[in-house]
Amino acid sequence: MKTWLISSLLFVGACGIAVGQVGGQLPDKQPSQAAKRDPKVQAMFNQMFSSYKGLDSLHEKVTFKFDVNVPGMLDEILPVELELKLQRPNKVALTYTVKNEKGKLSKYQLVSDGTNLYTYGGDANAYTKDKATAFLPRVPQVLKLPDFDVLFRNIDPFQNLAIPSESLVVGTPSKVNGTDIDVVSAIFQQGSQMNASFMLGFGQRDRLVRGMSFSGSGVSGGKPIRFKFDAIYDLVAANVKFADADFAFTPPAGSKQIESQSTKRN
């Protein structure tokens, strides 16, 4: 039960997802699950893919909320918040905070100025410096969001989603932060004693993700269980005009530079 819940909350399919070539084009062939989906749902997913592939730049801020009523159920490293600035082909300024198994918060940074790639870890207060790649860098799997899958991992974020494809339907349109959104939702059962619901919102005009929610309740091991996960997109701004300073890395106070794994291999 715990494995299924954690993987679902982090938007990872129960069978796992293989990471494709970073920075390339999305595969032309649609996944087999697409055949089971409502054509309207699949059309929205295809529009989302095209929207993110066509972006020149993007600015996002996302807040994550997890809530379960069983102690120990979320003893995992979980995201708390993030800010992303992205400019193609290879500039990124990603700052994010995670909470570890003991509840400690740590801040991380991934910054590519187009020439150099810096990776900072707040737990060790240390950073590495490498040569930037010609395409967008890899990002940690703990940041498991549909838009990150398309932008950074070149994969279909819905291919191995632990939600029955046939249960996905077009939901009731809504509004988030003043933006009109279309919704894909699902209500389904996991086993015989768990009921769950899923919601993913896209901007009606740009088809960029505006929110995601996953919740459920039921019985596990003879005990009642309740869980809820929300990814709240506080800011979504496409094709922003960034300055060079937006992708400049400033070492945090007291931090030290350490040798990266790629440098050691060389």
Image (tube, grey):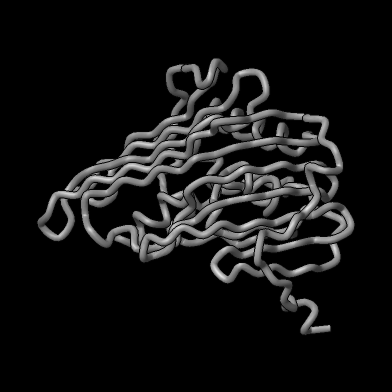
* Front-most of residues 59 and 128: 128
* Front-most of residues 86 and 53: 86
Picture layout, residue 265 above or below residue 160 = below
Quarter of the rendering occupied by the N terminus: bottom left
Tell me which residue sits at (60%, 23%) in the image: 203
Residue furthest left in the image: 222
Residue 199 quadrant = top left
Q: How many marks?
A: 0
Residue 183 position, x and y percent, is 49, 25
Picture layout, residue 72 above or below residue 227 = below
Residue 149 position, x and y percent, is 63, 49
Taking the image as shown, residue 147 lies to the left or right of residue 174, namely: right
Residue 10 position, x and y percent, is 46, 52
Tell me which residue sits at (47%, 48%) in the image: 80
Regarding residue 23, the answer to whether it shows in the image is no
Residue furthest bottom in the image: 265
* Front-most of residues 73 and 94: 94
Tell me which residue sits at (23%, 47%) in the image: 194
Picture layout, residue 155 above or below residue 257 = above
Residue 171 quadrant = top left
Quarter of the rendering occupied by the C terminus: bottom right
Residue 184 position, x and y percent, is 48, 29
Picture layout, residue 5 above or below residue 87 = below
Regarding residue 53, the answer to whether it shows in the image is yes
Taking the image as shown, residue 186 lies to the left or right of residue 200, namely: left
Tell me which residue sits at (62%, 43%) in the image: 83
Residue 260 quadrant = bottom right
Taking the image as shown, residue 27 lies to the left or right of residue 221, namely: right
